[in-house]
Image (spheres, rainbow, N blue to C red):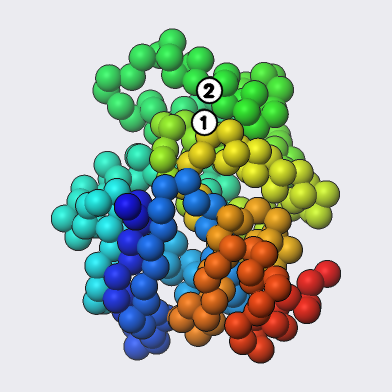
Amino acid sequence: MSVISLTDITAAYGKKGVLEHFNLDITQGEFVMLIGTSGCGKTTALKLMNGLLKPNAGRVMVNGKDLADTDLTELRRKLGYVVQETGLFPHLTIAKNISYVADLSRKKDKKAVKERVNRLLELVELPEEVLRRYPDELSGGQKQRVGIARALMNSPEILLMDEPFGAVDEITRRRLQEEIGRIHRRQKETIVFVTHDIDEALRLGTRIVVMDEGRIIQDGPPEEIRANPATDFVRKLISDRA
């Protein structure tokens, strides 16, 4: 059964069409890489999945529920969402940033929240002393690790990531890629990850969805994409690898 389903989606910004008759089904535990050039619709597709955008036509289903009839605030508390800018609150300590979503719950158990924060810190390999710091005291790589920890705070079954490592240096980027790959192997969440980097897609994904001009032009496992590119666009994407 699909945990995310986009069916016959049309999405536009004003008069500019981005997705048209777009269909995508994602099953539990997949690590799906959405890849394509800027403006191809991959970030639009991701935002449709958590209700940040509404389609002009078509249906978006998450965990069997139509987002048109869903409390989106409640939905987002059950999804992890990581973006390139990290979205950390500058006035909150790292501990408070990580626990932010859990702190919104009236039924929160403070001891359990603290234990969860400490476990996540270990998971993303950050030292305990960062909990007392503020975002502007951390490096770019550390901020991204905090962003991942915060996204995992409520044990989401689905993690959405929009070019999360695009703003860090290459060495840090590779370490973060290894980190998220390890987390996926350990925890088996469904991950949807937007990238423009074919090396990143081939390295991380269990499935790669190649997009161009709002359409899916190839969809398959990394080995198939690498060995049998379906179009000249995909062939060029593969041949342009660094």
Which numbered tag is attached to residue 223?
none
| Residue 157 visible in the snapshot | yes
Judged from the image, the secondary structure of the residue bearing numbered disc 1 is: helix
Q: Disc 1 to disc 2, how far (Cα)? A: 7 Å
Q: What percent of the width, then of the height, locates residue 189? A: 48, 41
Name which quarter of the figure residue 223 lies in.
bottom right
Q: Which residue is mark 2?
A: 117
Judged from the image, the secondary structure of the residue bearing numbered disc 2 is: helix
**How would you rate the neighbour count of disc 1 (Cα within 10 Å): few for under 14, some for 14-19, many for 20 or more?**
many
Which numbered tag is attached to residue 98?
1
Q: Amino acid at mark 1?
A: Ile
Seen in the picture, residue 36 relative to 103 is either above or below; the reply is below
**How would you rate the neighbour count of disc 2 (Cα within 10 Å): few for under 14, some for 14-19, many for 20 or more?**
many
Q: What percent of the width, then of the height, locates residue 114? A: 49, 16
The structure residue drawn at horizontal position 65% and vertical position 79%, both measured from the top left corner, is: 229
Q: Amino acid at mark 2?
A: Val
Whether residue 59 sits left or right of residue 32 in the image: it is left
Seen in the picture, residue 39 relative to 154 is either above or below; the reply is below
Is disc 1 in contact with disc 2, using a CB cutoff of under 8 Å?
yes
Q: Nearer the viewer, residue 8 or 102?
A: 8
| Residue 13 visible in the snapshot | no
Could you tell me which quadrant the C terminus lies in? bottom right
Whether residue 132 sits left or right of residue 78 in the image: it is right
Whether residue 127 sits left or right of residue 31 in the image: it is right
